[in-house]
Image: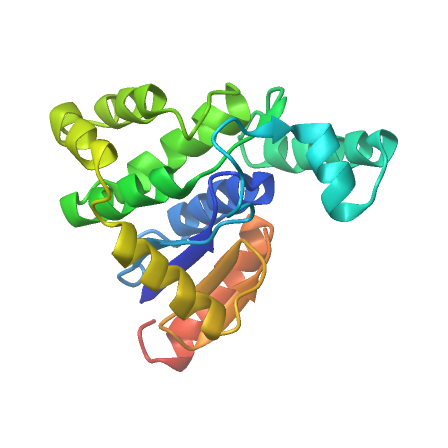
């Protein structure tokens, strides 16, 4: 079973969804083979290098006030806690394109899953800037990736074309919100579902495919 998780480092619901899906996969165990890949999606593709104040940005983008933003954050914190993810303060929103370039490389190296989790934790849990090369290099190093190679990638535009093409393909496939979990290129599970919902859907798809 191939699981493509279309998501963005800047997306808090993606953190909830990834942790929730991981719990579902742990419950499934070795009932059937699973391959997980993270696919790029940018919620804020035009975000400048200096980023933006989170409350101001969300207020302008979704036309909601600070009180509603805080209520939404509390909901997200509760959902995160339920699956083992701890949200910290996120005072700014950042550009994530370089993070996606690094994730593409990590996929080639076989460390994409680890890097994705580490980047989500760095931003949503620790308020670190996922567009800062120093942060990206440090997180890559902590995941066991070659820091010198990460420096080389971030210093140029390596994998930029590949990420842009993947983003285009998923948008053309109809993905317009994240997280979106796509199974075997045919089945879509939208949003940050609870672990039980992910598990049930995956087992049903596997059974229909004769895998379990």
| Rendered location of residue 26, percent (x, y) | 39, 46
In the picture shown, does residue 171 fall above or below 9? below
Give the image quarter of residue 147. Answer: top left
Task: Tell me residue 44's x, y (percent).
Answer: 55, 45
What is the quadrant of residue 28 in the picture? bottom left
Residue situated in front as seen by the camera: 81 or 77? 77
Foreground pick, 205 / 154 = 154
Q: Position of residue 210 (x, y in %)?
A: 33, 80
**Residue 38 picture location, percent across and down:** 36, 52
Asked whether, in this view, residue 166 is left or right of residue 182, the answer is: left
In the drawing, does residue 88 fall left or right of residue 31?
right
Residue shown at 59% from the left, 51% from the top: 192
Total marks drawn? 0
Q: Is residue 130 visible?
A: yes
Dividing the picture into quarters, in which one does residue 153 lie?
Answer: top left
Say if 181 sits above or below 85 in the image.
below
Residue toward you, 93 or 184: 93
């Amino acid at each position: 079973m191939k699981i493509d998780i279309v998501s963005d480092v800047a997306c808090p619901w993606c953190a909830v969804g990834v942790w929730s899906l991981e719990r579902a996969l742990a419950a499934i165990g070795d009932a059937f083979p699973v391959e997980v890949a993270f696919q790029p999606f940018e919620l804020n593709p035009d975000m400048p290098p200096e980023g933006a104040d989170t409350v101001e940005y969300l207020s302008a983008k979704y036309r909601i006030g600070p009180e509603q933003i805080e209520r939404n954050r509390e909901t997200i914190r509760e959902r995160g806690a339920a699956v083992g993810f701890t949200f910290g303060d996120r005072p700014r929103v950042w550009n994530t394109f370089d993070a996606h370039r690094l994730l593409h490389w990590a996929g080639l190296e076989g460390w994409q899953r680890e890097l994705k989790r580490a980047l989500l934790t760095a931003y949503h849990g620790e308020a670190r800037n996922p567009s800062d090369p120093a942060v990206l290099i440090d997180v890559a190093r902590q995941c066991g990736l070659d820091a010198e190679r990460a420096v080389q990638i971030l210093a140029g535009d390596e994998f930029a074309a590949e990420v842009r093409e993947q983003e285009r393909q998923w948008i053309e496939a109809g993905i317009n919100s994240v997280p979106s979990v796509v199974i075997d290129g045919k089945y879509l599970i939208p949003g940050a579902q609870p672990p039980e919902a992910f598990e049930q859907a995956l087992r049903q798809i596997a059974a229909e495919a004769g895998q379990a």
